[in-house]
Amino acid sequence: MNRITRVSSTRTKALCRLYLSVSLLMTHNAWSAPLPIELFIPDAPPLTFVDDSKGHGIVGDLVLMAIAKAGYVAHVQALPWARSQKHVSENQDILIAPLSRTPERENRYTWIAPIMPMERAFFSLEQQVNSFEEARKVYRVIGVGLGSAQEEILRAQGFGNEQIYPLTIGDNPAQMLLRGRIDAWFNGIPESRYIWPKVSRRKLFMSPVMNSATLYLACSKQCSPQRVQDLRKAVEALRSDGTLARIQKSYLPQQ
């Protein structure tokens, strides 16, 4: 081997070592940096707040903690709730919460972990009912959150389109009830009890619990199995160590 060949070989080896070092560094940084993940939530206090200085609500805070604990960084997104569900179900690796696991939704999402139970009831300013059958006879128009499980539940119980009035989730149904535009509001009990005192001091009649279902953290139908596993473990860890109970108490101190 002549001198020129030896120099060329030395330079080639040095370049190879440099490329290998850079490659390893890039790989290390890629693995160590938190992976971004989109999370869609509705503005449905006290379960979720889209923009509030106190936090993101019971479910929102827990899910954000779970995302961080699992090694991801959350990008909170908000669309009208029906559009959020459609967007998440039709795309890949996107999170959504809180979502009731209804038969209609079962095959559209990957169900990561249960968060908390949700009890639902009818709320009215005039008359309390004790069953779905009685509600069908008494209430002409019932407000529900647009795209919510409440709408699905009423339809499954035989309520017709003329009786169901979907409204933007939040205090809109409460305002419509106060104005007499709807006869009743079928909704989650914690949400209704949280919203109503901010709208009116009038007495609100509540039916017995009409439905109880668990709220979930869910993902797109096409969702990374590793992501699902990481988040499921994180949610269960936060439940086991008492974090969920503390969050619930901070938003619902009377319970």
Image: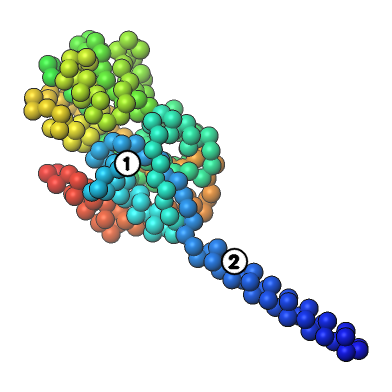
Q: Earlier in the sequence, mark 2 or mark 1?
A: 2
Rendering colour mode = rainbow
**Residue 90 relative to residue 127: left or right:** right
Number of numbered discs visible in the structure rendering: 2
Residue found 32% across the figure and 26% down from its top: 168
**Could you tell me the amino acid type at mark 2?**
Thr
Residue found 43% across the figure and 55% down from its top: 73
* Residue 89 appearing in the image: yes
* Residue 135 appearing in the image: no
**Residue 120 relative to residue 11: left or right:** left
* Relative vertical location of residue 58 with respect to residue 141 in this rendering, above or below: below
Mark 1 surroundings: few (<14), some (14-19) or many (≥20) residues within 10 A: some
* Nearer to me, 126 or 13: 13
**Residue 4 relative to residue 111: left or right:** right
- Residue 123: horizontal and vertical position, in percent? 18, 23
Q: Which residue is mark 1?
A: 50
The quarter of the picture where residue 130 lies is top left
* Quadrant of the drawing holding the N terminus: bottom right
Q: Which residue is mark 2?
A: 27
Secondary structure under tag 2 reads helix
- Residue 235: horizontal and vertical position, in percent? 36, 52
Residue found 35% across the figure and 28% down from its top: 148
